[in-house]
Image (cartoon, rainbow, N blue to C red):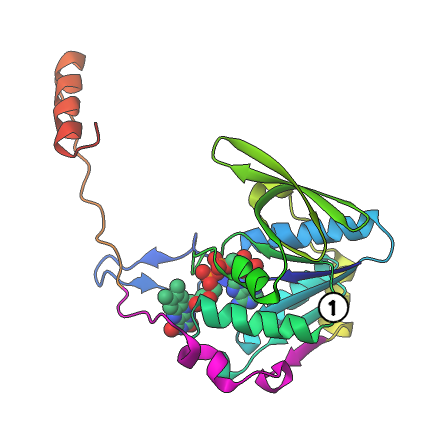
Amino acid sequence: MKVIVCVKQVPDTNEVKIDPVKGTLIRDGVPSILNPDDANALEEALALKDKQEGVHVTVITMGPPQADEMLRECLAMGADEAILLTDRAFAGGDTWATSNALAAAIRQMGEYDIIFAGRQAIDGDTAQVGPQIGERLGIPQVTYVQNFEVKGNEVCVQRQLEDGYEVIKVKTPVLLTAIKELNKPRYMSVQGIYDAFREKEVKVWNFDVLGIEKEEVGLKASPTKVYRSFVPQPKGKGTMLDGSVKDMTEKLVVALKEKHII
Ligand SMILES: Cc1cc2nc3c(=O)[nH]c(=O)nc-3n(C[C@H](O)[C@H](O)[C@H](O)COP(=O)(O)OP(=O)(O)OC[C@H]3O[C@@H](n4cnc5c(N)ncnc54)[C@H](O)[C@@H]3O)c2cc1C
């Protein structure tokens, strides 16, 4: 069984701070990490490999050359193969162009059974790339997967809803997007780190491998363009209420009504 996991390197948004004077994001020194939902996707692929003979796990990312390090971390967790899709032609792509490039690369990988992606990347935050890859490849997709089981060529998943879940059975090939409730990602092993950074190869693919036109990727292909980006206004200072509990409760109700919160 061949499993492909789409992984994205993202800035650790927990570490991004706002410059109180300039009001801009401070990105210097912010570490890059494997997108959290993608770690859940990879864990599920690796757990399947632990359980079942003959499971081969490939991780793929589209990104700058420094994404090599994240791919090696995936190898150190237990992935069998890593592909870095990198080329200036991909720069400035929106989700449409990103998923087009990733789907074209997956087509070049031959037969596959399951494609895993994270539900959402913590930087772009759109949750669109996974479903778009499924659409482009013309395969079924199930998003928000919180439980996963394979029986032969059938996958049975629980899809999280706001107030419950659906149980969905679907034939492979299929695209699934993982959420954090699915599992607890494993750590890299010491031997895994040694092998991944010393012995193993990250395959680097450029645009020419994909067999599509230049106009189909990157900024040119993107139907959307980011016109302006800005940092939200910092929240105002908090207000301390004083007086008796009754006074404070009344003031609180008035303040909340003024803000249309209640
Ligand atoms: C309107 C718009 C315009 C943009 N313009 C630019 C721009 O000009 N320049 C620029 O640099 N960026 C731009 N971006 C950001 C870029 O499009 C996104 O980072 C990228 O398309 C992935 O989308 P996302 O981060 O929302 O991922 P999501 O759709 O939230 O990701 C879901 C899952 O898809 C998979 N995935 C997503 N991206 C990748 C990847 N690169 N490799 C492998 N797997 C992946 C992962 O499994 C991830 O968990 C733009 C985004 C938008 C919405």
Q: Which residue sits at x=13%, y=18%?
A: 250
If the image is split into quadrants, where does the C terminus sit?
Answer: top left
7 in relation to 53, above or below: below
Respond yes or no on whether mark 1 lies under 8 Å from ligand 1: no
88 in relation to 235, above or below: below
Q: Quadrant of residue 74?
A: bottom right
Q: Inspect the image, locate mark 1, and give the three-letter code of the amino acid beneath it.
A: Glu
Q: Position of residue 46 (x, y in %)?
A: 74, 53
Magenta stretch contains residue 46: no
Q: Position of residue 137 (x, y in %)?
A: 61, 66
Q: Which residue is mark 1?
A: 81
Image side of residue 144 versus residue 248, left or right: right
208 or 131: nearer the viewer:
131
80 or 164: nearer the viewer:
164
Query: 10 Å neighbourhood of mark 1: few (<14), some, or many (≥20)?
Result: some
Q: Position of residue 114 (x, y in %)?
A: 70, 57
251 or 189: nearer the viewer:
251
Residue sitting farthest toward the front: 138
| Magenta-drawn segment | 202-229
Image side of residue 172 versus residue 123, left or right: right
